[in-house]
Amino acid sequence: MQEVQIIKRFTNRTEYQVIREWMSMRETDVTDLTAGKCIIPAAVLGKMSSDECNFLVAWTKQWKNQLLVFSPFRTVNVKEKLQLPVDLTISQINKSLYEKLPVREFFLINLKPKLQLSSGQIVAVDVFYHSGSGQVTLTTLPVLDYQLLNYEEKCKEIFMSLLSIRETQADE
């Protein structure tokens, strides 16, 4: 079973309770992240100090690491917090659905979308710092929202699809 990392001081968040039902998680301090995947709701990112964000960025820049950041983004300047090398704007949207899940935000960004609405608005995107770096996956889909438990299978399916499968021959 695949394991993801979460930041220890935020382990009681409901988003993490949802993930615990789906996969193994390891709680760690941001300064002790190991190679792999780390999941952070945007609200948590907003509560992190600039030093913690710098550690997170340095970790994410390492090859094969993946940072998944989930909505809502409305109060967080994710571009600044994560020092993203691309222009990124988050816009509000009304009454939109992605596979029956409500969408309240979308990204304005000049990158290939990972997921998008039928109308073209981007709801998930991978951002790389450079060609040899790990990646930041951003999504506005509320797949970790406990209020959507009646859509749990769809949320889990989308969540798993957002996890990168960047493996090398040496790992097999």
Image: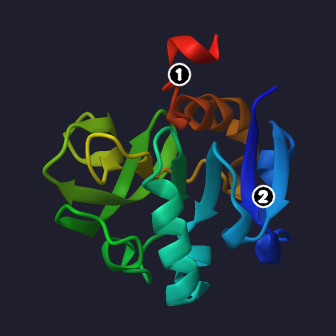
Question: Measuring 26% from the left and 48% from the top, which residue is drawn there?
Answer: 130
Dot 2 alpha-carbon crowd within 10 angstroms: few under 14, some 14 to 19, many 20 or more:
many
Locate the N terminus by quadrant. top right
Q: In this view, does 96 lie above or below 74?
A: above
Q: Which of 1 and 153 is in front in this view?
A: 1
Q: Would residue 129 appear left or right of 45 to someone viewing this image?
A: left
Which structural element holds mark 2? helix
Q: Name the residue under label 1.
A: 167
Q: Which of 115 and 104 is in front in this view?
A: 115
Q: Residue furthest front?
A: 170
Q: Which of 149 and 58 is in front in this view?
A: 58
The amino acid at mark 1 is Glu
- Per the rendering, the mark at residue 16 is 2
Question: Residue 93, position in %: x, y?
Answer: 30, 62
Which structural element holds mark 1? loop
Q: Which comes sooner in the sequence, label 1 or label 2?
A: 2
Is any atom of residue 70 visible in this view? no
Question: Residue 95, position in %: x, y?
Answer: 37, 55
Colouring of the image? rainbow
Is any atom of residue 78 visible in this view? yes
